[in-house]
């Protein structure tokens, strides 16, 4: 049975951000699943291989693998598909570890890019815009270095984004001015944000 979520549903805005991570490519049979949404008893998950978005499944939607039929300003429609048809979903928990380096900042994309640049981290700007949009609340950024994915948490949404290492990353290090540290609120990470072991769907 299909699932319809209207704009009045408390999950609507968050779910639209989760859907941004669905793959748009025509994959081989082994990667067809990346074009679909995974709903588990505890989490709703989407990934295109370069980024991973997930949120709690509350109130619970029926677990399964779903194709996106429609997502506009008023409703989201999902149709269930058979795992035998699209393949097994990858173990997404392998990339959900949270770094101990936590920065609390705003959703202003220019400030966020400035922070990431000072840390030697380069990510796809489109991926950030898909997450931030016109939001104004505080976010938490978890990161280590330019070699590891970053994690952003906005309310109930968690987004993991792979880094893009620019061609001149090794040959042209940042200047002293570029390394100027932006004053941000660095807070200790006492949270256990890593999801538990996978559930059967």
Image: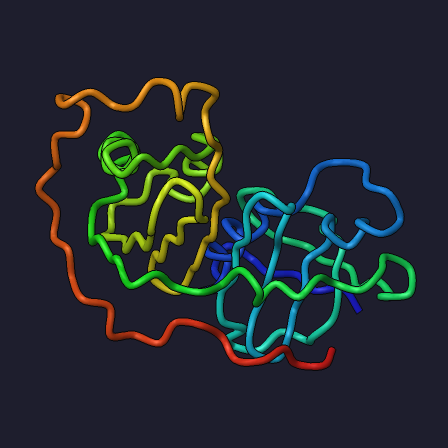
How many circles with numbers are drawn on the protein?
0
Viewer-closest of 146 and 77:
146
Q: Quadrant of residue 108?
A: top left
Provide residue 62's location: percent of width, then percent of height. 68, 76
Residue at the spot 52% in from the left edge and 55% down from the top edge: 53
Instruction: State the colouring used for the structure image.
Output: rainbow
Residue name at image x 68 percent, y 43 percent: 23
Closer-to-camera residue (67/140): 140
Q: Is residue 180 above or below residue 134?
A: above
The quadrant the C terminus occupies is bottom right
Q: Position of residue 29 (x, y in %)?
A: 89, 49
Residue projecting furthest to the left: 183
- Where residue 3 appears, x then y in whole percent? 70, 64
Closest to the observer: 166 or 187? 166
Residue 156 picture location, percent across and down? 39, 65
The answer to whether 133 is drawn above or below residue 174 in the figure is below
| Residue at 66% in and 61% down | 4
Q: Quadrant of residue 121?
A: top left
Identify the residue shown where x is 28% and y is 55%: 140
Instruction: Say above or below: 150 vs 64.
Output: above
* Horizontal side, residue 20 vs residue 131: left or right: right
Q: Quadrant of the N terminus?
A: bottom right
């Amino acid at each position: 049975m299909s699932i319809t979520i209207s704009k009045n549903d408390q999950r609507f805005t968050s779910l639209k951000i989760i859907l941004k991570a669905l793959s748009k490519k025509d994959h081989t049979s082994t990667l067809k699943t990346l074009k679909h949404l995974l709903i588990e008893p505890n989490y709703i998950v989407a990934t295109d291989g370069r980024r991973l978005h997930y949120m709690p499944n509350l109130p619970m939607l029926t677990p399964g693998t779903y194709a996106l039929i429609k997502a506009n300003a008023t409703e989201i429609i999902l149709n269930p598909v058979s795992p035998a048809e699209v393949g097994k979903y990858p173990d997404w928990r392998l990339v959900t570890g949270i770094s101990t380096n936590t920065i609390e900042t705003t959703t202003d994309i220019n400030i966020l890019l400035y922070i990431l640049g000072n840390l030697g981290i380069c990510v796809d700007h489109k991926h950030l815009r898909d997450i931030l949009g016109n939001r104004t609340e505080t976010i938490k950024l978890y990161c280590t270095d330019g070699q590891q994915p970053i994690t952003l948490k906005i309310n109930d949404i968690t987004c993991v984004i792979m880094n893009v290492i620019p061609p001149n990353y090794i040959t042209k290090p940042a200047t002293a001015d570029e390394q100027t540290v932006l004053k941000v609120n660095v807070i200790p990470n006492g949270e256990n944000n890593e999801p538990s072991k996978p559930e059967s769907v």
